[in-house]
Image (cartoon, coloured by chain):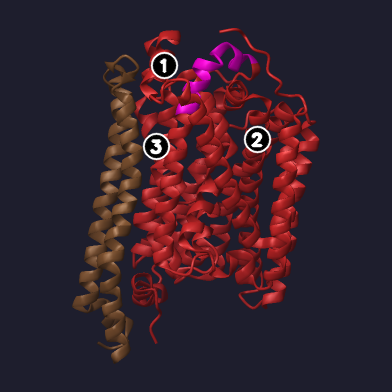
Chain colours: A red, B brown
Amino acid sequence: MDQFTSTIGQPNITSILFFFVFITGTLFITYFAAKKSKTTADFYAAGGGISGFQNGLALAGDYMSAASFLGIAGLVSLRGYDGLIYSIGFLVGWPIIMFLIAEPLRNLGKYTFADVVAYRLSQKPVRIAASIGSLMTVCFYLIAQMVGSGALIHMVFGLKYEIAIVFVGAVMICYVLFGGMLATTWVQIIKACLLLSGATVLVVMVMAKFNYNPVELFAAAQAKYGDKVLAPGGLVSNPWDAISLGLALMFGTAGLPHILMRFYTVPDAKAARKSVFVATGFIGFFYILTFIIGFGAMVLVGQDVISGMDKGGNMAALLLAEVTGGTVFLGFIAAVAFATILAVVAGLTLAGATTLSHDLYVNVFRAGKANEQEEVRVAKIATLCLGVVAVVLGLVFKGQNVAFMVGLAFAIAASANFPALLLSIMWRRFSTLGAVFSIVTGTTLAVVLIVISPTVWVSILHNPTAIFPLKNPALISMTGAFIAGWIGSVIKRDERAESLYAEQKVRNYLGVSVE
Amino acid sequence: MSKDPDAIINSPEFKALVARQWSVSAVLSIIMLGVYFGFILVLAFDKGLLGSMITPGLSVGIPIGLFVILLAWGLTGLYVYWANDKYDSAVNAIRQSLRRN
């Protein structure tokens, strides 16, 4: 095949057109959502009026980032089978959310997962601790997304990195500030539909060249690059590394604040279950599509061209779109990638703002005594501040290697948020001190261990050997959080919390409160 | 049945509900954990196995990876099916009897 020259990086009329249609449409939705968003329930949870199916799509839209679309397709295009291992890790957390978290979360909480942890415990210490876990997860995830989006937009549209970051920040602030959860939800639903349909069309166009038989595509890849592309390579080598990363992905998904808060947008536990089923199906389908897209790019574009454009392979899906559908289709897929970034950062910012206003301001600073108007106002101020912080962090971390921050966000979510949430639901004796110990231990271990691990200590700080051997700390930090929760609960029992357990359990299972 | 939460959670109906919900959740979680960690341990210890070819263009690892993805979705579907069918009716029965008293 001839080496082809890509037009990626030059202004693309179709792309700009699609993009403006998307921005105009979503801002229009935001305008209508703004009229309906008056109360705290509207702002944080879209008034609980989202259906199970809609929430499933929105969850998928919240979770499928540009990094997983472009990054995993790129990983597959350069390393073959290894990319699939990565996507499977990101999917298997969803059944865990379903079996252990979704229904209790919906029945016991109001707007944040900290509502559930603090249900029986002393509000102030538990909310402060839970906010730390929440905000750290959101911030690390946000930095990774912002830096990735700036670099991506720069590469695809030729726009300056700084302008791209400010633009993403401004549009995202508009969605969340004016439209709250309702606008954010619809942005995520539209984005999920665009991403799923765009990826499906891309796969159909690839498969048309291989008689609609994936095995023929894989065989072509094998003929071109050898057996190794269909076999596991170096991604999983040390079993302890593999287990630790597996734990972070599996239980981290069940501790991501922006995912957990989506369960409050549906009317009841039944709709919450349905939304996990719908989300898992779409996300799984999406990962199968990215696998085919990766192999399509490997065969039809070629590894030299892909890695020539970007070492990490991030341009693979876009190059494939150009090869199969020309500049018009490239423009469409590029616009979809942009929409994807906006939807994910909007969800993260809303989750962070909710933690700041609902958990910290209202329940800690004002001891639960703020009225609706005051709370909505604070939530909006928090959105604005967090949006500005996201832009500043995006600018500060320009050109830095921030890929590890996604792994760190998952490790903190699995260590700080998940153990406290699970223990508060299931264990009568879980006390205030236990919750604080658990969250603080999980967060501290996750952050400290990743700094002295090969991921940061060797790859970023360039030391010869790492002090801590595992690339992801979840195996130790999550275990540590459970042990700390147990120790804290044994040291200082919480009589009031234990006496409230029966009432919590009734509400957890029956979805109603007694009395 | 009284409306005292302690009495409710100690009632045989509620205990049966909790036991059934917990066993379904635990079994499904263990299946998911077992399959996923089994998959990555096979990857870590025996790369050759998943890399061996069934036919040209298809290694053992590809259908197995696809299976893990479909299983994850299938298990959530199984849970929804069970919960809509059995769990919700048990919950409603207990709610009804609470309302009568």
For the N terminus of chain A, the image quarter is: top right
Q: Secondary structure at mark 3?
A: helix
Q: Quadrant of residue A18?
A: top right
Residue A364 percent coordinates (x, y): 62, 68
Report the residue marked by disc 2.
Answer: A332
Residue bounds of the magenta highlight? A292-308
Is the residue B101 above or below the residue A387 in the image?
below
Report the residue marked by disc 1.
Answer: A229
| Chain of the residue displaying label 1 | A
Q: Is residue B3 left or right of residue A345?
A: left
Q: Quadrant of residue A512?
A: bottom left
Numbered badge on residue A443: none
For the C terminus of chain A, the image quarter is: bottom left
Q: Earlier in the sequence, mark 1 or mark 2?
A: 1
Q: Is the Cβ of the residue at disc 3 closer than 8 Å to that at disc 2?
A: no
Find the distance from the CA under tag 1 to the CA under tag 2. Answer: 29 Å
At 46% from the left and 43% from the top, the residue drawn is A283
| Chain of the residue displaying label 3 | A
At 56% from the left and 16% from the top, the residue drawn is A301
Is the residue A293 above or below the residue A443 in the image?
above
Q: Specify whether residue B87 is painted magenta.
A: no
Query: Is the residue marked by circle 1 packed among few (<14), some (14-19), or many (20+) residues within 10 Å?
Result: many
Q: Is residue A16 left or right of residue A205?
A: right
Q: Amino acid at mark 3?
A: Gly
Q: Secondary structure at mark 2?
A: helix
Residue A176 percent coordinates (x, y): 69, 57
